Image (spheres, rainbow, N blue to C red):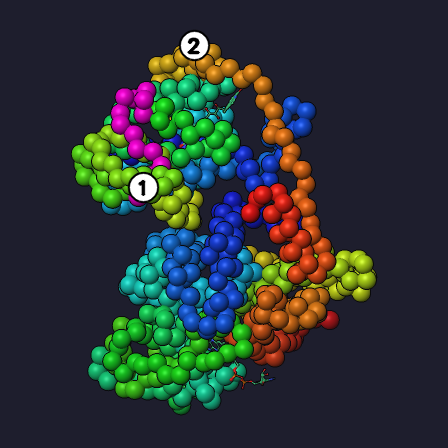
Amino acid sequence: MKYSLTEEQEMIRDLCRIVADEKIRPVAAKYDEEQTFPWDVVKAMGDADLFGIFIPEEYGGLGGGVMELCIAVEELSKACGGIALALAGTALASFPIILFGSEEQKRKYLPDIAAGKKLAAFALTEPNAGSDAAAIQTSAVRDGDCYVLNGTKQWITNAGEAEIYTVFAVTNRSKGSRGATAFLLEKGMSGFDFGKKENKLGVRASATGEIILRDCRVPKENVLGREGLGFLIAMKTFDQSRPGVAAQALGIAQGALDEAVFYARERVQFGKPISSFQGLQFMLADMATEIEAARALVYQTARAIDAGEKNIAKESAMCKVFASDVAMKVTINAVQVLGGYGYMKDYPVEKMMRDAKITQIYEGTNEIQRGIIAANLIKEYARKKK
Amino acid sequence: MQIIVCIKQVPDTTNIKINPETNTLIREGVECIVNPFDMYAIEEAIRLKERCGGKITALTMGPPQAESALREALSLGVDEAVLISNRAFAGSDTWATSFTLASAIRKIGHYDIILCGKQAIDGDTAQVGPGVAAHLNIPQITFVKKIEEVTDRSIRAERMMEEGFQILESPLPVLLTVVKEINEPRLPSLRGKMKARKADIPVWGPEDIDVGGDQIGLNGSPTYVAKIFAPERKGSGKIFRGDAEEAVDQLIHELRSGKLI
Ligand SMILES: Cc1cc2nc3c(=O)[nH]c(=O)nc-3n(C[C@H](O)[C@H](O)[C@H](O)COP(=O)(O)OP(=O)(O)OC[C@H]3O[C@@H](n4cnc5c(N)ncnc54)[C@H](O)[C@@H]3O)c2cc1C
Ligand SMILES: Cc1cc2nc3c(=O)[nH]c(=O)nc-3n(C[C@H](O)[C@H](O)[C@H](O)COP(=O)(O)OP(=O)(O)OC[C@H]3O[C@@H](n4cnc5c(N)ncnc54)[C@H](O)[C@@H]3O)c2cc1C
């Protein structure tokens, strides 16, 4: 199907396809097994300008939007959802700078990200604050021209590998959801350390780790927006970034469908290719249909965001929920289509099934997304007359 | 350092079909690519520029659609491109092709290093590079697998030979043809692709490079093609079936009796 992509979007897709085929697919299983960070691939992605896609031209990027980012993440995720996360995680951490950063902060940080010289990470989650982000305990106390940060962040994508960190901390506990502030931290600041590296089910080529802040002094120039805007910044960022997670899910699902159909045409049982059995045909038909529906929702939402639509939380949540649920279902069925071979590490579908799971959990679990969708829905109807 | 790369657009022969009646390529629906060896030439040109500075110009002679090969070169980091295209050039053999390319290079004027692929995967003659050097009356080093040293006056390069290699030194300007061992071509970048899409590519005809008449195209081609035929099909292989050990014994027996081992 044609998706009415612009010439530039097609260019991005084609180039990402080349990067995926030549640089990612050949090493996806290796990095999954070793669970090390794929710096060689990330460097190739940087050389291809992929980290500049979503960054404005005046800061060294290519000036694309959410749609361009989604196309890239989808295409890379077909080959490896974990490696694609180096890009998606960097985008997640860059959006707060793009949306709320001062001119100076943008000039200081965005060009290096766009050039692929520095990765970025977004640090909100803590041991006792997952879905309930407002429960974060990391504190930031003003001291002269600095803030002093203390606390622990966990499960942070790109932790240890990134140079630039968007960190959320409480500046005024009495103000509740208006009491958090976003800071820009740099690797190497004194009092900024890394803790445990996680051993994971999926996206094992992505680094997920702990950040430990012990009296970390951060200059006040590194506050994003202003004091108290932390949660607003996080929520507005998620509205922009959730289609990216959806695109990751979409890519993983498409990758799994591709494997399943190729395999079903080759594998012979009862004297016929298994693709001739209606039981499998219907499964493949449903997989393909759901992927197409997910793609339509993701692309449409991404385009709406880029067109400047303001109230996008509901649709942004919808595409993340839908695409990630599709990815989970499709990858499970892809393993089913490949039978015992699908269960083996010799074929990529078991990895895709493991990789798909995270898309239902991070950037707000699907339960939290459904909550967002319902809350917006009910609010909209409250305004309508019957 | 002024560098010129000659590139040829060729059909992607990995999935090509031959018309069994005429013994010619079926070109319809076949994707065109930059001759793979020329990708190494482009990469080496970019590396030379990264080392010594300067400018790279890509050159191709071909039909109008060969422009896309030049845009690909531009997307990789080539600075300028020229398409040599005109009906008058059609039917060029290797002599006419290299004469035409040499004339275009003379027109460009200043050049230190000219890079070509070892051979084109369709014509396969490996004559055009040396031909260009001969027409320009400059030295050539063919089958280069490594450039050891370049100064603004000379170059030292390793040539791949069937047994071992040679190290040659030459003054500039020089023409090199490169083998795939020389480097690993980079992927294009988005910025490069966008620049390439917008680039102006001049098209030069015979009058632009001061050639014409019986120097170019079919008239300028001394090659006379008497007959084209497909190589005789080899008989189909033999498959030894059954238990692996038995099959191997049979195979060894067969090879021995054929005096092959
Ligand atoms: C690989 C990986 C990478 C990550 N990367 C990052 C990152 O880069 N930056 C970052 O800040 N965080 C990151 N996270 C954290 C991630 O965003 C959280 O795991 C997620 O928000 C869920 O929080 P939790 O795991 O604490 O689950 P919990 O909040 O403890 O939830 C447990 C279960 O309860 C359900 N639940 C919770 N509250 C409700 C409710 N109100 N209604 C219904 N159900 C509910 C949840 O849906 C879930 O099923 C990452 C996590 C992983 C695993
Ligand atoms: C037996 C035979 C019959 C032929 N008959 C015909 C015919 O009837 N009609 C016809 O049109 N052609 C014909 N050709 C094809 C034609 O001669 C060659 O395709 C052409 O001259 C280039 O030679 P090549 O492909 O062997 O390139 P090679 O010499 O193998 O190429 C070496 C390098 O030279 C450079 N180069 C080659 N061609 C170009 C180019 N066009 N522009 C820029 N750089 C280039 C590249 O760097 C390339 O890697 C015939 C060829 C043969 C061998």
Relative to the observer, which residue lies in front, A239 or B213? B213
Q: Distance between the Cα atoms at labels 2 and 1?
A: 40 Å
Q: What residue does disc 1 label?
A: B165
Q: Residues within 10 Å of mark 2 (few under 14, many from 20)?
A: few
Under tag 1, what secondary structure?
strand
**Callout 2 amino acid:** Asp
Relative to the observer, which residue lies in front, A325 or A203? A203
Magenta highlight on residue A90: no
Residue A257 rendering spot, x and y as whole percentages: 66, 61
Mark 2 and mark 1 on one chain: yes
Question: Can see residue A83?
Answer: yes
Q: Residues within 10 Å of mark 1 (few under 14, many from 20)?
A: few
Left or right, B257 with respect to A85, comes to right
Under tag 2, what secondary structure?
helix
Q: Residue at x 27, y 21 (%)?
A: B137
Chain at tag 1: B
Left or right, A219 with respect to A299, comes to left
Question: Can see residue A232?
Answer: no
Q: Which span of residues is magenta-colored?
A: B133-146
Residue A197 rendering spot, x and y as whole percentages: 41, 80
The label shown at residue B214 is: 2
Q: Residue at x 31, y 41 (%)?
A: B165
Relative to the observer, which residue lies in front, A361 or A97? A361
Magenta highlight on residue B144: yes
